[in-house]
Amino acid sequence: MSSDYYEPVKGNILIVDDKPESLQLLTATLQQAGYPLTQETDSCVVLSVAKTINPDVIILEADLTGINGYELCRQIKATPETKHISVIFLSFLSAVEDKVRAFEAGAMDFISKPFQPPELVARLQNYVSYSRLQLELETQIQQLQKERVDRIAAETALQKAKETLERQNNVDSLTLLSSRPHFDESIEGNWRQMQRESAILSLIICDIDLFKLYNEVYGSEEGDESLRRIAQAMRSVVKRPGDLAARYGGDKFSVVLPRTDASGAITVAKHIQREVLAMQIPHSRSPLNYLTVSIGVSMVEPTRSMTSAVLISTAEQALAQAKQEGRNQIIFRRVPDIHPPVIQ
């Protein structure tokens, strides 16, 4: 994991909900997390309030008396003074059409009630950062227009702002694990650090078995929920400071384990495999009738004559072998082993 730590900025949050119990629970959750809050129960004055206090994020109930949440979101996004604000729906309405309406109206996210406080807080920080970067971007564009900078200069500034946003987006919004860009940054940073220390670096790459079939049978919404649950299992296993669990891409996950030998890395892989099996996520097309994972594990002592690509490639080869040999297996390869053992 990167050694650069910072205290997340606690953005200003506007909560719009006319249901007292929901408002009370949400307020308590965010106050405990340290967020400055403003509450509003009258949907008809929300746009005026938002212009006045300029919140970073608006948490919006869809089913509001007066102006409903969808129309209110459209108004917020259509108003120049408020269009940069991230809008999150938090609602008891949870049908697919409700979520589609929210995203069509300009929402960043839709979370169904009852919500999980840790998940909400984790997502919220990303949207606070996004809103502030959007506002910064708009301010830059306005300044460029005032100074009559030509179109090429304006496009360059816009691209730089987007790149800044991407660098700060270290969390995968679906699984709440580290994102792939953060994984790439972490493994490169750890590679250099392990070189200096003459220490071992291990990598785990795991893939959900027969996940394409799972989506065909149960649908993409259930597929996304399964990805979140497996990510939760990985977070419960990968707890050591410096280790990094990330969404590698699609239905693949990865774990970067600095200063961890083969035995330690295989132990982590076994824990992940057991946690996934213990959840017993039904999969009628799987041999065990539950979702399983295949895992590739690799280890190396980084040297200047190699790059991190060899560690990643070796772990991917181990994963491919695990899937070829029946899935729901762990295969270990040490760089540059050619005949790795099968882990029973």
Image (cartoon, rainbow, N blue to C red):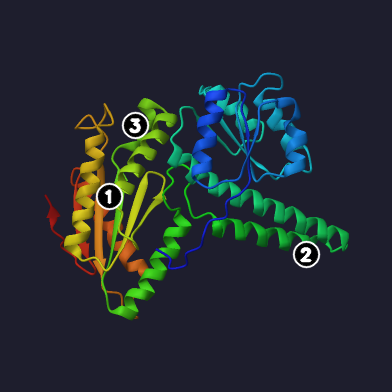
Identify the mark nearer the N-term, 2 or 3: 2
Which residue position is annotated with label 3?
A: 214
Mark 2: which secondary structure? helix
What's the distance in space between the residues labelled 3 and 1, CA to CA?
24 Å
Q: Could you tell whether 275 is left or right of 130 in the image?
A: left
Q: Is residue 157 left or right of residue 6?
A: right
Left or right of 109, for residue 77? right
Which amino acid type is marked by label 2?
Ala
In the rendered image, is residue 305 in sight? no
Rendered location of residue 54, percent (x, y): 72, 45
Q: Callout 3 environment at 10 Å: few (<14), some (14 to 19), or many (20+)?
A: many
Residue 9 position by quadrant: bottom right
Does the CB distance between marks 3 and 1 fall below 8 Å? no
Q: Mark 3 vs mark 1: which is more N-terminal?
A: 3
Q: Give me the disc on residue 74.
A: none
Q: Which residue in the structure is indicated by mark 1?
A: 237
What amino acid type should be assigned to the residue bearing mark 1? Val
- Where is residue 334 drawn, in percent x and y? 21, 66
Q: Residue 279: percent from the left, percent from the top?
A: 26, 34
Marks 2/3: CA distance? 48 Å
Disc 3 or disc 1, which is closer to the eye? 1
Q: Which residue is mark 2?
A: 153
Vertical order, 12 against 211 (above or below)? below
Circles 1 and 2: CB atoms closer than 8 Å: no
Element on which disc 3 rests: helix
Q: How many dots with numbers?
A: 3
